[in-house]
């Protein structure tokens, strides 16, 4: 499943190439998770102003149509779902059975390929209102934003009895900490994944916030080489997984102390940790 790092890598690979591209045709395949929410033809003539990311969503800001009186700007909110990928190509190849959304632009064909069709492209008048506003409401802070601080983390964890691993995965405190990244960040921070969120001190939140940023930025840095892996839907992680310190290393020696790495199940997801290095 594409995680925040893969979505960010996708954004980075598209933003400069698509900026100012004009849409000349739209093709819809089979229904995606949510309907487009506008007449496909109403996208024609709009230019891509920018592509930003919020959590695992990409926002394609689109300008107003020059030939429509008093037309309003808007945009498309795209999500890659479980198995989606976005590709911009100058070859206008015929769509395959998994290609469910195409934008033909002056800079090439932007195509959403999504075998499982949990992805979507949704029109919205802005990122903050309409369909996009609703879908993005309730997301936690961005891990790379200045607003993601130890103080904020500590505040949002206050009173929570749920295990810290699950609090991170929920995405309502900070977005983007998927299953691999949660195990890795807790290892770096030396925190037992079973620790109740509300019991983590401010000093440990400092280490945890740093660890989350470190793990996710490393994954983005490796993303360029993992893109093919994640397009093949072999699950998230790709190259990052090869340098995981605890994830998927059950029984192998901890890289720091040699103690065998343990696997437990929390909320039906595997968690890996070192029982010696990570404390409650
Ligand atoms: Zn250890």
Image (tube, rainbow, N blue to C red):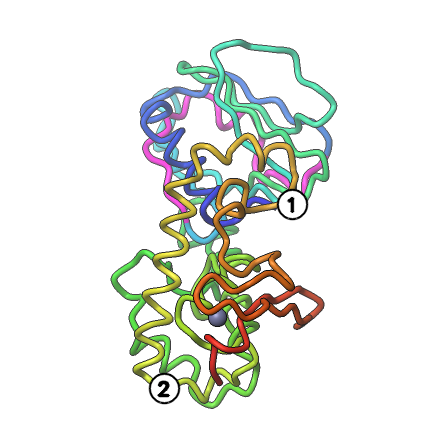
Residue 123 visible in the displayed image: no
As displayed, is residue 128 above or below residue 79? below
Where residue 208 sits in the image (x, y, percent)?
37, 71
Q: Is mark 2 on a helix, strand or loop?
A: loop
Where residue 198 sits in the image (x, y, percent)?
46, 87
Residue at the disc numbered 2: 201
Q: Local crowd at mark 1 within 10 Å, few (<14), some, or many (≥20)?
A: some
Q: Nearer the viewer, residue 24 or 254?
A: 254
The residue at the point 42 percent across, 87 percent down is 158
Where residue 31 sits in the image (x, y, percent)?
71, 36
How far apart in space, not on screen, are marks 2 and 1 (Cα)? 35 Å
As drawn, is 83 to the left or to the right of 7? right
Residue at the disc numbered 1: 82
> What segment is highlighted magenta in the picture?
31-53
Circles 2 and 1: CB atoms closer than 8 Å: no
Residue 86 visible in the displayed image: yes
């Amino acid at each position: 499943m594409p995680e925040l790092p893969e979505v960010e890598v996708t954004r980075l690979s598209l933003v400069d190439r698509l900026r100012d591209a004009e849409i000349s045709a739209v093709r819809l395949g089979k229904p995606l998770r949510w309907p487009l929410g506008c007449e496909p033809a109403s996208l024609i003539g709009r230019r891509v102003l920018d592509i930003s990311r919020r959590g695992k969503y990409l926002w394609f800001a689109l300008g107003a149509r020059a030939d429509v009186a008093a037309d309003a700007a808007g945009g498309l909110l795209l999500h890659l779902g479980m198995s989606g990928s976005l590709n911009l190509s100058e070859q206008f190849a015929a769509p395959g059975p998994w290609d469910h959304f195409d934008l033909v632009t002056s800079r090439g064909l932007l195509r959403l390929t999504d075998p499982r069709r949990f992805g979507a492209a949704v029109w919205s008048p802005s990122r903050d209102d309409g369909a996009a506003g609703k879908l993005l409401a309730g997301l936690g802070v961005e891990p790379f934003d200045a607003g993601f601080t130890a103080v904020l983390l500590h505040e949002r964890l206050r009173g929570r009895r749920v295990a810290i691993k699950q609090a991170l995965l929920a995405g309502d405190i900070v977005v983007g900490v998927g299953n691999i990244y949660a195990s890795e960040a807790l290892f770096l921070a030396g925190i037992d994944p079973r620790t109740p969120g509300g019991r983590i001190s401010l000093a440990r939140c400092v280490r945890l916030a740093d660890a989350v940023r470190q793990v996710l930025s490393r994954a983005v840095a490796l993303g360029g080489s993992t893109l093919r892996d994640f397009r093949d839907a072999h699950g998230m992680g790709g190259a990052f997984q090869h340098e995981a310190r605890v994830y998927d290393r059950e029984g192998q020696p901890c890289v720091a102390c040699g103690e065998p790495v343990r696997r437990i199940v929390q909320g039906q997801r595997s968690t890996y940790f070192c029982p010696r290095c990570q404390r409650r």
